[in-house]
Amino acid sequence: MMTTLLVAVLSAVPCEDFAYAAQNTWNEGKDPLTPALDLHVVVERATEGMPRDSAFARSFRDATLTSKLGVEVRNTLDTAKGVVVFLRCRERAGFPTALFSVRYEAGGFGHFELELRPRRSGGVRVVDFWTSFDAEWTSVNLRRIGLLMAPAADPVAALRAKLFGEGVPFTDAHITAMSAFNAAARAGDAKATEQHFTELHPSLQKDRSIMSLRTAGTASDPNASSRAVEAFTAAFPDDPSVALKAFDSHFTRKEYDACLEALDVLERTLGLDPWLEVLRARVELAANHLGVATGHADRAIELEPWNLQAWFTALDCAVARKDHSRTSRLLDGAVKAGAKYTRESLGASDAFKDFMRSPEGKRWRPPATEPEPE
């Protein structure tokens, strides 16, 4: 049972209020994370057990405390034109977390999770940060990457063997190779990422953090990216970050069963996200499983009736089935949700050609919508 004190602490964290405010701030083009993020907690977790006489640990702390994680998130959303949707609050180690779904204009997707604590002065602070791309909390990820690059002579290197095993050599040459690999991967230089990856010790090439960096660094090269994703998937088949990275590759190759399995892996970690239903519908539509695709699209609309992508996907299914009555009803719903369909736009679309020739299409007119409040 939770103690009275813990119940009081949890009740002092207005998770949903903070999460909805953060969602709105992100979608207004601003950054809610930087002012709320307590980097000192992230640093404490990332440097736990590191010797006080470690010069590397001191520089690692300083670099982390001056990092701009919140700004980086905001820049990613701007660059990829992402929309953030708050899903739910849940718990980590007895404290609340806020989970968000991110949907990018080009079709990509991802998730954020923020671990929350109350501020003594009131309000909420974020003490750690998780993304489905890494599938690790920021403090854990920083610790692993930091220990990989600590100089062999530094006292902090003693911690490395506990994490990576006694048999992995960490000479200065290996540290240099690791640093070069890390820099190439973070710069998105696929050729250099692959080159420096081959220079790493074979044991490190199988490390989860290294494999994750490799997939990120080779994303611009389809062949190199496929090799990286395949190796990562083989080593960590149930890892949500692997599933996220593999989804596009599977879809491009028309490996639709593998796409659906990737979405299932993500859902097992995240719980219900209506966007995954949209993606399932699109996969089943591509596989020409029109009835199943329709069911997933309908479920997405039920969960998020404001989500135009869910309506568009349902319409694609109805048009593919030549179900003109359903197409007419979905067009009404889509327009009420904010879509800009007109008789002119439908008449100019090859996809709606058969519908517009049908009796239902000839009768269809955009329904009246309520004016937006001033």
Image (tube, grey):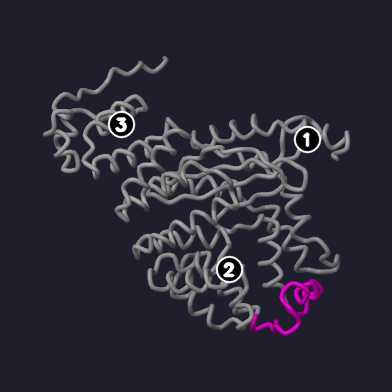
What segment carries the magenta color? 152-174
* Residues marked 2 and 1 touching at CB (< 8 Å): no
The residue lying at 70 percent from left, 82 percent from top is 170
- Percent across and percent down for residue 166 are 76, 82
Q: In the image, is residue 338 above or below residue 175?
A: above
Front residue of this view, candidates 65 and 90: 90
Q: Tell me the element at label 1.
A: helix
How far apart are the alpha carbons under marks 1 and 3?
Answer: 43 Å
The quadrant holding residue 367 is: top left
- Percent across and percent down for residue 152 are 74, 79
Q: Quadrant of the C terminus?
A: top left
Q: Nearer the viewer, mark 2 or mark 1?
A: 2
Residue labelled with disc 2? 236
Q: In the image, is residue 64 above or below residue 31?
A: below
The residue lying at 48 percent from left, 45 percent from top is 77
Residue labelled with disc 1? 10
Identify residue type, mark 2. Answer: Phe
Q: Nearer the viewer, mark 2 or mark 3?
A: 3
Residue labelled with disc 3? 330
Q: Residues within 10 Å of mark 2 (few under 14, many from 20)?
A: some
Q: Image check: 276 left or right of 164?
A: left
Front residue of this view, candidates 366 and 255: 255
> Which residue is farthest left?
357
Identify residue type, mark 3. Answer: Leu
* In magenta stretch: residue 164: yes
Q: Which mark is residue 106?
A: none
Mark 2 vs 1, N-terminal side: 1
The residue lying at 60 percent from left, 43 percent from top is 99
Q: Quadrant of the N terminus?
A: top right
